[in-house]
Structure formats: structure tokens, C-alpha cells
Image (cartoon, rainbow, N blue to C red):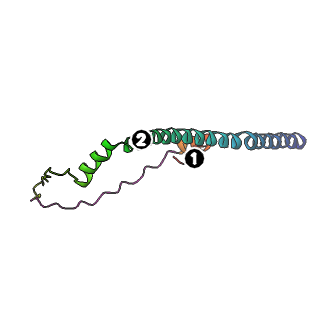
């Protein structure tokens, strides 16, 4: 009976060691791979936004090199007029109502369910900043 019990304990110990080695060699590196893939996707999205902004700025820089654009900006932003023209400024009437500042209400953050935390751990989402 004791020999059978020691054999069962040995089998259980071997299974625990195998399960731990599978966990250490597969799950943890997999989390890092998923986290790195998410970081790459975030960086690509940010790169697309930056490229779009760069294109817009290049177009704006080309437009600023023309005399017509410089004159338009000088008239709109600085109030410049040509000799012989008259500039008029239209003012909005002042508001008569009294405004009361409202303090923002802090809403407590909702806690994730335990299974969401486990899923985020297994997929590596807890390693990536949103």
C-alpha cells in the first residue's frame, strides 16, 4: 500500500513539474509576444496619425509661401488693411447673466471582474499601456 501511495505521489509531483514547465515556457513568453504585437499596432496607428499631420503641415507650409495667403492671414489675424481701406470691429455685447462654477463629480473607476483580469494577464494586455 505504501509503495502504491509513494508511486502516486511521484506521478503527481511529475505532473506538477510538467505543468509548471509548460506554464513557464509557453504562457509567459506568449504574454510578452502578445504585448509586443499590441505595442507595434499602437505605434503603427500613431505613425499613421503623424504622417497625416505631416502631410497637412506640408500643405499649409506651401500655402504660406504665397502672397495671397500671407495677405489673408494678415487681414484676419492682425487686422491689417490696405491704404485707403477702413477697418471695422464688431463687438459682441457683454453677457449679463451670472455664471456659477460647477465642480466636477468624480466617478469611481469600475473594477474588472476576476476573469477579465485573468484574461488580460494571459493575453498580455496588462503589460501594454492603452
Disc 2, SS: helix
Would you say residue 71 is visible in this rendering? yes
| Residue found at x 51% / y 42% | 46
| Residue found at x 66% / y 43% | 32
In the picture of the structure, the residue carrying the numbered disc 2 is 62
Quarter-wise, where is residue 95 in the image?
Answer: bottom left
Q: Is residue 11 left or right of residue 28?
A: right
In the rendering, at what x and y percent does residue 64 appear?
A: 37, 45
| Residue found at x 81% / y 44% | 13
In the picture of the structure, the residue carrying the numbered disc 1 is 128
In the rendering, at what x and y percent does residue 109 appear?
A: 42, 52
Taking the magenta stretch, the answer to whether it contains residue 8 is: no
For the N terminus, the image quarter is top right
Structural crowding at the residue carrying mark 2, measured as other residues with C-alpha within 10 Å and reported as few (<14), some (14–19) or many (≥20) = few
Structural crowding at the residue carrying mark 1, measured as other residues with C-alpha within 10 Å and reported as few (<14), some (14–19) or many (≥20) = some
Q: In this view of the protein, which residue sits in the foreground, 49 or 122? A: 49
Amino acid at each position: 500500500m505504501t509503495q502504491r501511495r509513494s508511486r502516486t505521489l511521484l506521478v503527481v509531483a511529475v505532473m506538477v513539474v510538467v505543468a509548471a514547465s509548460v506554464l513557464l515556457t509557453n504562457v509567459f513568453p506568449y504574454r510578452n509576444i502578445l504585448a509586443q504585437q499590441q505595442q507595434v499596432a499602437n505605434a503603427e496607428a500613431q505613425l499613421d496619425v503623424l504622417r497625416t499631420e505631416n502631410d497637412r503641415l506640408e500643405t499649409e507650409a506651401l500655402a504660406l509661401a504665397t502672397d495671397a495667403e500671407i495677405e489673408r492671414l494678415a487681414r484676419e489675424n492682425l487686422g491689417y488693411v490696405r491704404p485707403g481701406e477702413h477697418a471695422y470691429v464688431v463687438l459682441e455685447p457683454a453677457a449679463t447673466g451670472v455664471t456659477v462654477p460647477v465642480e466636477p463629480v468624480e466617478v469611481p473607476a469600475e473594477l474588472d471582474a476576476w476573469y477579465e483580469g485573468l484574461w488580460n494577464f494571459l493575453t498580455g494586455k496588462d503589460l501594454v499601456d492603452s
